[in-house]
Image (cartoon, rainbow, N blue to C red):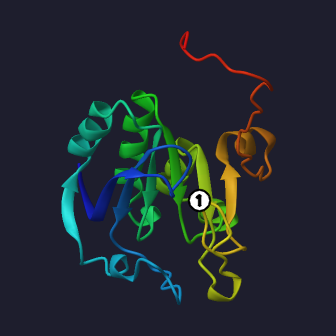
Amino acid sequence: MKISLSGITGDSIVDGPGIRLTIFTQGCPHGCPGCHNPQTHDPNGGSWGDTDEIIAVMAENPLLDGITLSGGDPFMQPRECTELAKGAHKCGLTVWTYTGYTWEALFAEQDPDKLALVQESDVLIDGPFLLAERSLELKFRGSRNQRIIDVKKSLQKGEIVLWKEFTFDLPKGPQTFGGL
């Protein structure tokens, strides 16, 4: 399936946890002032890619933890992005999706293609970038109004559940790694 792209980054560590294949879709209706990807706004810009080829790239990289669908706005091409998300899940990868739409707006619209992309995402970062809410201290988002939503838990509970990063403490004391 053809998809309009602004670009692909093969080893991102800023668009979600771990090493991610970040797919920047082309086309965005939001036009957020201060957007760090304004070149992605024009739906007639970018270049064409193929979802099967992108899925093959993700399948060949054993270091990937997941893919991130960014933009532009992936919900401008929901069927194509759902195809990529399904391919990522078949490869055992997580799917993070960024959008300028809010969770509420996506569900109010009741577009089956957009809802399919929500459901195929593990995490949704929603809401427009607001320059007045911008902070460089935020992890995985650009402005304080944006939420990092755990999609699976939210769908199960019927209300928004924010994603919480998994952390763990290492045991105290001397460590032995691999018999060293």
Q: Residue at point 50% right, 81% down?
A: 30
Looking at the picture, which amino acid does disc 1 mark?
Gln
In the image, 17: left or right of 9?
right
Q: Position of residue 27 (x, y in %)?
A: 36, 74
Q: Which residue occupies 59% across, 78% down?
A: 129
User: Residue 4, percent across and down?
Assistant: 26, 64
- Compare residues 67 and 172 and report the one nearer the observer: 172
Relative to 46, say whether 15 is above or below: above
Q: Secondary structure at mark 1?
A: loop
| Left or right, residue 58 beside residue 20 | left
Q: Circle 1 is placed at which residue position?
A: 110
**Rendered residue at 33%/70% (across/down):** 26
Residue 99 versus residue 53 in the image, above or below:
below
Q: Does residue 52 sit above or below 90 in this rendering? A: below
Q: Could you tell whether 146 is left or right of 37 in the image?
A: right
Give the camera-side residue of 67 and 64.
Answer: 64
Q: Residue at x 70, y 45 (%)?
A: 165
Image quarter of the C terminus: top right
Whole-percent x and y of residue 16?
Answer: 55, 51
Residue at the limit of the structure toward the top, as seen here: 179
Q: Quadrant of residue 138?
A: bottom right
- Taking depth in this image into account, of 140 and 105 the one nearest to the observer is 140
